[in-house]
Image (cartoon, rainbow, N blue to C red):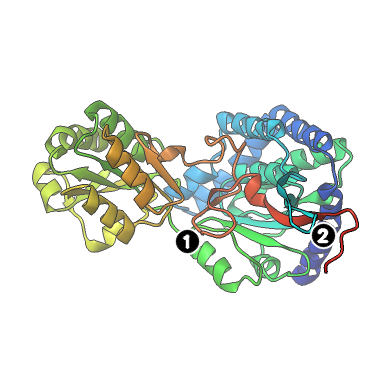
Amino acid sequence: MDVSDIKQYMQFVGKAARTASRSIAKADTATKNRALIAMADAVRRDQALLLAANAKDLDKARAKGIEAAMIDRLTLSAKGVATMAEGLLQIATLPDPVGEITDLNFRPSGIQVGKMRVPLGVVGIIYEARPNVTADAAGLCLKAGNAAILRGGSEAIHSNQAIAACVKEGLLSAGLPETAVQVIETTDRAAVGELITMQDYVDVIVPRGGKSLIERIAHEARIPVIKHLDGVCHVYIDEQADIEKAIRIADNAKTQRYGTCNTMETLLIHRNIANKVLPALSKIYLDKGVELRGDSTACAMVTAMKLATEQDWYEEYLAPILSIRIVDDLDQAIDHITQFGSQHTDAIVTENYSHAQRFLREVDSSSVMVNTTTRFADGFEYGLGAEIGISTDKIHARGPVGLEGLTSQKFIVLGDGQIRQ
């Protein structure tokens, strides 16, 4: 197929996906699992090929001067390849949601009314940098009974095509159509514009990438979008926190990885415990090269800290930069998160049960945590096998989107000859 005619090419891809979606929707669990296991086997077998393809992408990215956060997301290690394979295998072990019947109840008329879980149909995924999304999205869409059209960023074209070959091999080995998962072969951005408007062929769009990409997709799409715009994540260290836990958690939430959407960007500390945790934490951060920006109280405690601006509280740095604010109490911490947060992931460190419960109830984010790091806000860590993205929307899917988020429900009615009077 000639990919130079973008509109014609994308129509061809869309038609093929719609046709394949019918085969995938009726595929049984054993067949889908065979495909997933074969994909994982191919990924593990081709580790060297995947890393070599990724090295090409990295060389080109560095030559273009792409920012460090993007390079971090683009990099595929041997451990990353193993994690991709493990994610596919974990998806294979998960219960198949397709066809699940719930809430079946008799009505006074004698009919039974319930709900059945069904695939969405064709899922379009648009993503930047992360090659692992190719495997994660393919596996999740397949297990949930959907066809997928994947459009990765131009910076990861070699990595994505290499992973796509493993996915195709897995599908064919299980007797499923290879067009059930298609990776767009062109880097032309016009392909994105076509994909997000193909209402006849695509049922939902999932964008994964920078804020500008997601804003563009949300604005221009004529198809429902599952999305999050920002990952302004907080950790609040309560007055009644265990100091050792607090330091370990706040360190990990920021420095375990800088370029991810679940990395802490603002640390909130109760005034009465600040002098016990901030000096030790700031030393850890500064030793790791993290730039600290704080309010006047925090700056007075740490001389190497810069004074934060109002904009810093809104910022998703995706870099070794951290904002720190000293708060008077739990109410002020929650108020800060409500005003400046992005409803992604927020955590409290406390030994006070009532404070923990208030935080869980009152912080309106897609993941809310007690005494652990925000870095756990991830489909793989949640036992979803992997994730196709994280949603901060409140309709259909919220938080890491796994199998259930890639399905919908329809009403089913069972009768025995009843007619409406």
Q: Position of residue 389 (x, y in %)?
A: 57, 50
Classify 10 Å Cα crowding around label 2: few (below 14), some (14-19), many (20 and above). Answer: many
149 or 48, nearer to the observer: 149
Of circles 1 and 2, the one toward us is 2
Type of amino acid at the residue the image marks with label 2: Arg
Classify 10 Å Cα crowding around label 1: few (below 14), some (14-19), many (20 and above). Answer: some
Q: What element carries label 1?
A: helix
Q: In this view, does 199 lie above or below 401?
A: below
> Pointer 1: what residue?
211
Identified at 73% across, 70% down, the residue is 199
Q: Where is residue 329 in the image (x, y as percent from the top left)?
A: 19, 47
Where's the C terminus, which quadrant? bottom right
Type of amino acid at the residue the image marks with label 1: Lys
Q: In this view, does 212 lie above or below 153?
A: below
Identified at 34% across, 34% down, the residue is 371
Where's the N terminus, which quadrant? bottom right
- Give me the C-alpha separation between circle 1 and circle 2: 29 Å
Q: Is mark 2 on a helix, strand or loop?
A: helix
Q: Is residue 247 above or below residue 171?
A: above
Q: In this view, does 297 lie to the left or right of 382?
A: left
Q: Position of residue 309 (x, y in %)?
A: 21, 60
Identity of the residue furthest to the left in this view = 300
Judge whether residue 260 can be spotted in this image.
yes
Judge whether residue 131 can be spotted in this image.
no
Q: Is residue 230 left or right of residue 287?
A: right
Q: Where is residue 56 in the image (x, y as percent from the top left)?
A: 61, 43
257 or 342, nearer to the observer: 342
197 or 408, nearer to the observer: 408
Identified at 84% across, 39% down, the residue is 28
> Pointer 2: what residue?
18
Tag shown at residue 393: none
Q: What count of labels does the image hold?
A: 2
